[in-house]
Amino acid sequence: MSSRSSEFPPDLRQELAGLLGPRGYLDQPHELTLYEYDGSVDKILPDMVVFPRNTEEVVAIVRLTAEHHIPIVGRGAGTGLSGGSIPRAGGVIIGFSRMNKILSLDAANERAVVQPGVVNLDLTYAAAPHGLFFAPDPSSQKACTLGGNVAENAGGPHTLAYGVTTNHVLGLECVLPDGTVFETGGAVPDLAGFDLTGLLTGSEGTMALVTKIIVRLVRAPEAIKTILGVFNSVDHCANTVAEITARQITPVAIEMLDGTMLRMVEQATHAGYPIDAAAVLLIELEGPRESVEEQTEQIRVICSAQNAREFRVARSNEERDLLWKGRKNAFGAIGRVSPFYYVQDGVVPRSKVAGALRFIEQTSNKHGLVISNIFHAGDGNLHPIILFDRRKTGDLERAKAAGEEILDHCIAVGGSITGEHGIGMEKNETMARLFSDATLETIRDLKSTFDPRCRLNPGKVLPTGKGCGEIRQAVLETGSVHY
């Protein structure tokens, strides 16, 4: 899609350039193409990308763009999977990559204060010498930033026990679209008043720009056991998950890979997954040593009762790291097999996982597309990955249709259309099938309270007609695909 730079106010461009200096912005077409996409399937060029170094510069950028009624979109590392950082209405992308400092780390109180551009895994590295870590661990944690995690309320494999990002955010410093700076929450939990921190976490950059984050750190456990269960039946694998939770055992992670996915992963990472299996479970237990040992044996019995053909416990940190390397690098492994793929993010109740996998298989056969599955089985967060080739006529349309049908199935069985990737511009129309008109109007009213002129990340979350009608939205091109 072509840039709308010709419509961008020249004086605003000059003012932003003067504010940030020659290395503080991008405005050339070949530079802007690096910011027209995220990990989803659409592309739209911004008019300008700017890189503030502190809150004061964010405020100045917001006020300058407000004078011209130019949309602004916050962006972290661009690893999102729902189009959240794509500038749907053009305008200015505010990239937070230079606001990447850990401002303080209070080990005694298990807290840290960070800027939004801090990489997720870097915070854990900084906390590790104190016996602490940051629990939310998206698969992209080597690259994704904490500001993006807050915007999308990101999860990860260990959310079953530790929860998602909102469970680990204590406070925020934010900038409103008129340049007002305000703070929510604080270093201690359960402050009086409305939970604005919870409201803004997961709001996908549509209400405020986050410039500082107070996070909770977690004490490293005494013992960790990582288990690989191997199955010849997808149903037996899925039923094992339901049985584990029914026995009131709560692993910190239960990840499921079907045969199609584990073969791609093994060929790329050599993590030790059996390529002839129908599915595997990657299960992790943490806690006091005695409890972990006891639960390991309980899970061994459950897997055996569900006809697991193999039950393997990692014997060293190296074996554990290798198994997780396979899981964490799964999306990269797909690139060796398919030039394009489309990732969905539906959620179903745990008891409906086996049925959902059967439905996905039927959808795969119906559309003639390979669909592999890798997901957080413990909380029913599905990630069907639809392989396609946009160079083939109709392939993209079939992939999108398959994704829509899978999400409709999730809604029909009492689930949701996203567990951690967000709504963005990918699923905003599907929101009308999940929520009533009254609920959508309430969401719009909240958005308008924070952003009355609708400049912050317009065209996201709410369906067309329920969101910002006064912002001209770019028409998406069917063939504009990154993955």
Image (spheres, rainbow, N blue to C red):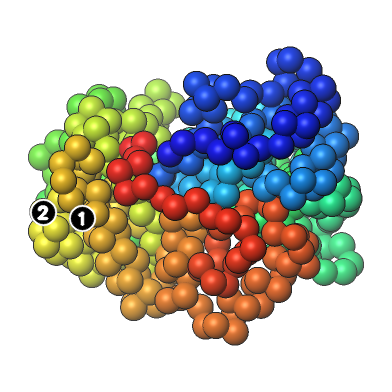
10 Å neighbourhood of mark 1: few (<14), some, or many (≥20)?
Answer: some
Give the CA distance from mark 1 to mark 2: 8 Å
Residue in the foreground of this view, choosing between 137 and 208: 208
Determine which of the numbered discs, if any, sits on residue 398 in the image.
1
In the rendered image, which quarter contains the N terminus?
A: top left
State left or right for residue 270 relative to residue 275.
right
x and y percent of residue 362 in the render?
A: 14, 64
In the rendered image, which quarter contains the C terminus?
A: top left
State left or right for residue 222 relative to residue 258.
right
Residue in the foreground of this view, choosing between 359 and 305: 359
Determine which of the numbered discs, if any, sits on residue 368 in the image.
2
Name the secondary structure under disc 2. Answer: loop
**Residue 141 visible:** no
x and y percent of residue 385 in the render?
A: 28, 48
x and y percent of residue 304 in the render?
A: 21, 56
Residue 196, quarter of picture: bottom right
- What amino acid is found at the position of numbered circle 1 in the picture? Arg
10 Å neighbourhood of mark 2: few (<14), some, or many (≥20)?
Answer: some
Instruction: Give yes or no for contact between labels 1 and 2 (Cβ–Cβ under 8 Å).
Output: yes
**Residue at 64% of width from left, 31% of height from top?**
49
x and y percent of residue 239 in the render?
A: 26, 65
Name the secondary structure under disc 1. Answer: helix
Q: Is residue 291 above or below residue 313?
A: below
**Residue at 48% of width from left, 63% of height from top?**
428
Q: Is residue 315 above or below residue 254?
A: above
